[in-house]
Image: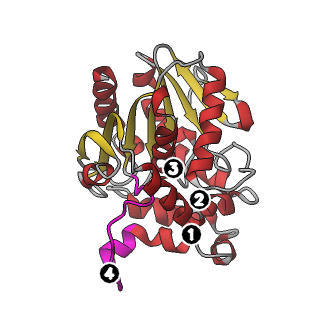
Amino acid sequence: MTSKWQVKRLLHGIRAIVGGQGPPVILIPGWPQTAEAFSDIFEPLSQQHQFFALDPPGLGDSPPSLNGYDTAYVSKIMAEAIHDILEEESKYHLIGHDVGGWIAYSWAAQFQSRIKSLSILDASVPGFLPKFEFPLSNQTNLRLWQFSFNALPELPEILTQGRERELLSWFFNLKTYADGFPGDKFERYIQAYSRPGAMSRGFEYYRAFEASAKQNLEFAKMPLDIPVLALGGAGSVGSGMIQLVQNFARNVSGGAIDECGHFLPEEQPAAVANRLLEFLEAN
């Protein structure tokens, strides 16, 4: 990350990387990442927009949540932090990847009047996953193992403490289209998740998955009317993101990013930036 971007501390201690000028865009990363996950698209976004890349509560350099990790609560805290610094009633675009996509949907469902558009990148939003039969196929198990493992009480901490590098190395290699991951990004994530309690706070988002799913099914009774872009890596969820998002939004477009796994903004930043900027410009 270059020095041209500012790091700010917002309401509730939320850490934000801020840059650019123009209509505001909010970026929310997933697990096990930080706001730097979007750093390769900061430059193109900044040409037309002011961006705010946020560390969700308990992840990166934002402090732990004070009242749980269900996405209705977490998104409310993050929305308050953004509304506190934007002009009253000003509208913004919302973009979330992975767990950030979970948060972004709940945020949009609660504050739709403030949001111009929503983009969800390769995220299995709680409440809308297809029903699976057990035992899972090997392919499905490789894609979704973390939903079961991370949600277990105590065991994830027992097995991963002191072995964060080994876990994250395996995880990123598994979920990228091509082996390997940008070294500077990877080291940033290792640093962030090797801190005391950091892995536990990430696991808590998965332990709250069932609560978040129940909240989302209630929200979905009033589908979103704002434009929604649903993108998936061709080697991951792919164009299936469109069908998932149609469960809770009426105006959905999107598709697959070629030669890409789960980590869209890092694996294919140019393609992702182009799709996002086209969508933001249209809305």
Per the image, label 4 sits on a secondary structure element best described as loop
Residue wearing tag 4: 133
Query: Amino acid type of disc 3?
Result: Gly
Residue wearing tag 1: 150
Instruction: Pinpoint residue 40: horizontal percent, then vertical percent.
Output: 44, 34
Residue wearing tag 3: 30
Instruction: Pinpoint residue 78: horizontal percent, then vertical percent.
Output: 62, 38
The vertical placement of 24 against 202, above or below, is above
Per the image, label 3 sits on a secondary structure element best described as loop
What is the CA distance from the residue labelled 1 to the residue labelled 3?
14 Å
- In the image, what residue occupies the spot 44% across and 46% down? 97
Which segment did they paint magenta? Answer: 123-143
What is the CA distance from the residue labelled 3 to the residue labelled 2?
10 Å
What is the CA distance from the residue labelled 2 to the residue labelled 4?
24 Å
Callout 2–callout 1 Cβ contact below 8 Å: yes
Q: Using the rendered view, name the quadrant where residue 199 is placed.
A: bottom right
The vertical placement of 154 against 215, above or below, is below
Q: Please say which color scheme the image uses.
A: secondary structure
Relative side of 268 to 190, left or right:
left
- In the image, what residue occupies the spot 52% across and 18% down? 90
Let me know if residue 83 appears in the view.
Answer: yes
Sequence-earlier tag: 4 or 3: 3
The vertical placement of 74 against 44, above or below, is below
Sequence-earlier tag: 1 or 3: 3
Query: Amino acid type of disc 1?
Result: Asn
Q: Using the rendered view, name the quadrant where residue 222 is placed.
A: top left
